[in-house]
Image: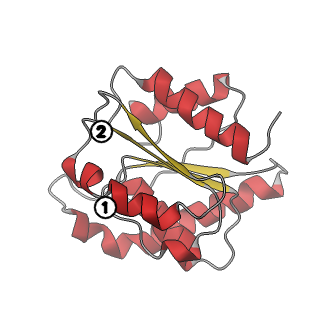
Amino acid sequence: APDFELYGALRVKLAQAGYSTLSIQMPVLPSTAKIGDYLPTFGDAAERIGLAADWLRARDHGKLAIVSHSLGATMANHYLITRSDVKVDAWVFIGIINGLEDMFRIKIPVLDVYGSRDWSVTIVGADERRKQFQKIAGSRQVVVEGAQHFFEGQQDELTKIIASFLDQVLARP
């Protein structure tokens, strides 16, 4: 859900840091679904992200960033590599659950943030992810010591990392 636990906390904390947020409900399958079951939903997810970006651009919200977590980050990756009309200026992915796809297609700064106690599928792919985006100016990877996949108890630190990155790459005063 767009405002559940980590997502709701990030929305509040990013607003306190001076950022407006719009939460997008990504496609959801039954709890028994495996990651592969979500592949057919990626097109719908990309459409939702694109529509949200269009809506924000139409209201002159300035520079836009996607802040995404876990499977939502994988869906955002799909949007960024399959759409020729990407209208975002930066991408934050938190605890992405697999590697990045076709990163050479992404030209915007990215922040890869995950916890040192994150899911193993996130930790194992960290070096490869960094290799894929290290040539994109402004991009970086941050490991939050002791953090788990949902950053329980470390949401303030996560927010500071995200806001610092966005301040830098979006050139916000």
Q: Quadrant of the C terminus?
A: top right
Residue drawn at point x = 54 percent, y = 33 percent: 161
Q: Quadrant of the N terminus?
A: top left
Determine the secondary structure under disc 1. loop
How many numbered badges does the structure rendering display?
Answer: 2
Coloration of the structure image? secondary structure
Side (left or right) of 36 relative to 78: left
| Three-letter code for the amino acid on which mark 1 is drawn | Asn
Disc assigned to residue 98:
1
**Residue nearer the viewer, 131 or 154:** 131
Q: Residue furthest left?
A: 32
Q: Is residue 102 above or below residue 49?
A: below
Determine the secondary structure under disc 2. loop
**CB atoms at circles 2 and 1 under 8 Å apart?**
no
Q: Is residue 28 above or below residue 81?
A: above
Q: Residues within 10 Å of mark 1 (few under 14, many from 20)?
A: some
Q: Is residue 117 above or below residue 22?
A: above
Q: Where residue 35 sits: x, y (%)?
A: 24, 63
| Three-letter code for the amino acid on which mark 2 is drawn | His
Side (left or right) of 89 relative to 135: right
Side (left or right) of 38 relative to 1: left
Residue drawn at point x = 82 percent, y = 49 percent: 62
**Residue nearer the viewer, 102 or 38:** 102
Looking at the rendering, which quadrant does residue 98 occupy?
bottom left
Tell me if I can see residue 57 in this picture: yes
Q: Where residue 43 sits: x, y (%)?
A: 46, 74
Disc assigned to residue 162:
none
What whole-number distance in Å separates the C-alpha atoms at marks 2 and 1?
A: 13 Å
Residue drawn at point x = 31 percent, y = 55 percent: 97
Disc assigned to residue 149:
2
**Residue nearer the viewer, 156 or 59:** 156
Residue drawn at point x = 65 percent, y = 51 percent: 65
